[in-house]
Image: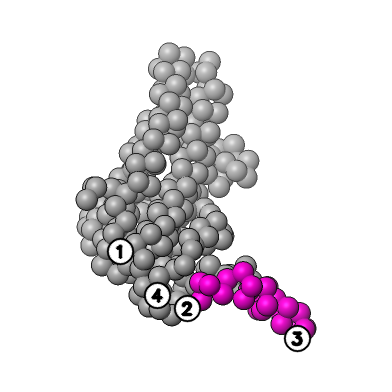
Amino acid sequence: MARYTSAYSSLVTHVKEVEILQKLADRKAKSDPIGCKHEIDSLSRGAVVLLCAHLEGYIKELGEVTLEAIYKRGVDRGNVSAAVYYHISKDFIEIIKNTQNPSSVSGHMFNLLKNDLEYWQLSGPFPSPIPSDRFNRGFASPSHKKISAYFKRFGYDNFIGDMQVYLKAKYLILSNAIDHLVDTRNKIAHGDPSASKTPSELLEMLAVTKEYCRAVDSVFAFWCRSVLCCIR
């Protein structure tokens, strides 16, 4: 069994472009910190946005790996959380919830049945791949709590508790660092000129993000193996 999932391997590859930006910013900071200040800030801000995007992409890909494993390994639907079904069909369900007219509700119900009936069974394997694009919809700004909420889509309710046990004294350091990364990214996206990082701070962000994701990978993969199936 591999030590980490293919999703984590992809993350390691993807963050190399962030490492390139960090190294370039660092060289400029060492050669001409005053004259290159604008370039250093631009490189660092871009690196923060990319790093946050890769973190979000990692969590989504981890979910995709899990959905694919559920289908390919023929996991019995009796072992799958009811939350999974909601997130498969949530586009239809949300429309139905917000519709008042009975005829319109019926029309939307027929659409749900036409498109998703094959998934809605209480036993046996899924007859076709679970649509990961629909399942992942709505997940963004990957703070620690939002990552926990994402895993609840699979029925994994004790992610935070398991991370606390796994990381021990490092739990607060890493979870707060992830929240800080997302907060910095959001400030950059909203045009806050003060939201920037030095090259050394960016290097630390890279290190803690990878360490956090390794912990996520281990904790979530262990839960999947215990409840659903092996994903690595």
Camera-near label (2 vs 1) is 2
Residue type at numbered disc 4: Gly
Q: Earlier in the sequence, mark 2 or mark 3?
A: 3
Q: Tell me whether the residue at label 3 lies in contact with that at label 4, contact meaning CB atoms closer than 8 angstroms.
A: no
Query: Residue 129's x, y, as percent?
Result: 48, 60
Q: Quadrant of residue 155?
A: bottom left
Residue 227 is a magenta residue: no
Residue type at numbered disc 3: Pro
**Mark 2 → mark 1, Cα distance in angstroms:** 19 Å
Mark 2 packing: few (<14 Cα in 10 Å), some, or many (20+)?
A: few
Mark 1 packing: few (<14 Cα in 10 Å), some, or many (20+)?
A: some
Q: Tell me whether the residue at label 3 lies in contact with that at label 1, contact meaning CB atoms closer than 8 angstroms.
A: no
Q: Which residue is mark 4?
A: 124
Q: Quadrant of residue 172?
A: bottom left
Mark carried by residue 121: 2
Q: Is residue 106 above or below residue 14?
A: below
Query: Residue 17's x, y, as percent?
Result: 45, 30
Q: Which residue is mark 1?
A: 229
What segment is highlighted magenta in the picture?
94-121
Q: Tell me whether the residue at label 4 lies in contact with that at label 2, contact meaning CB atoms closer than 8 angstroms.
A: yes
